[in-house]
Image (cartoon, rainbow, N blue to C red):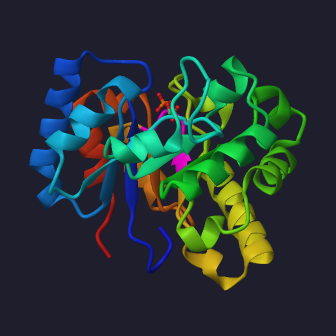
Amino acid sequence: MTPGIRPFIAGNWKMNGTWRGSIALADAVREAAPSIYADLLVCPPFLHVHSVAQRLLGCRVAVGGQDCHAQPAGAHTGDIGAPMLRDAGATHVILGHSERRANHAESSDIVLAKCRAALAAGLLPIICVGETRAERDAGAAQAVVAEQLTESLPLGFVTAGGIIAYEPVWAIGTGLSATEDDVAAMHAMIRHRLVDAYGPAARTTRLLYGGSVKPANAAALLALPEVDGALVGGASLVAADFLAIARAVAAE
Ligand code: PGA
């Protein structure tokens, strides 16, 4: 953890869950939230954002989207604009997730445009960066992540409270998390570059780790320097696992 940064545990529910199941998951998180030190966020599929946000009204658990369009509104069949997410009760949005970068050909330019749209709508972006297995094996992991950071973050990102999630692509949904040394080295590089580019304000930018975070490895990952929380996929669908990860954060 970074001293002075409140830890942040985010659940990315991806394309999972019925309406009823999403409400039940939200209720379980809501009930446990008062006994958890970390700030919590859940990111349901678009369809359930409003219901989940209603269910979590007045409690400390925030709600986010998993993507947004770069335009606020218009003829974009099937897409969702950032102001719509805000209107539905979201306060955050995940952008540039590797599944979006891979399955929807999202380049860092597109992520940058979406990030600007999110900030304009008053949403806090969580920008995902991370290398593939081949890039890591080629010794290019840090260079790839550095380039994604340079290309995906707009001016104003840091002062607005934008969040970065380092998610090695090969660790997502595979059960293989990065080693503690690799995570620590990557997070140190990210912090260094952010402070270089944005100044001292970036010392308190939240840097999350994501990729097969589970109750068994959460405490060790979350204790690393410059790891201010986690972006949790699969394990966030099981309330007990998500809450166990959130409880693994040591209170300051
Ligand atoms: P995972 O997903 O926890 O299932 O690996 C993480 C993510 O995609 O954010």
Relative to the observer, which residue lies in front, 143 or 50? 50
The front one of 249 and 87 is: 87
Q: Identify the residue at image location x=31%, y=53%.
A: 40
Res 216 quadrant in image: top left
Q: x, y percentage for residue 214?
A: 38, 36
Q: Residue 151 or 205: which is nearer the viewer?
A: 151
The reply, left or right, for residue 243 in relation to residue 6 is left
Image height of 75 relative to 129, above or below: above
Residue 169 quadrant: top right
Q: Residue at x 74, y 30 (%)?
A: 106
Quadrant including the C terminus: bottom left
Q: Give the residue furthest to the bottom.
A: 200
Dominant secondary-structure state across the stretch colored magenta: loop
**The magenta stretch spans which residues?**
209-213
Left/right placement of residue 84 relative to residue 89 reads: right
Q: Is residue 241 magenta?
A: no
Residue 20 horizontal side relative to residue 43, left or right: left
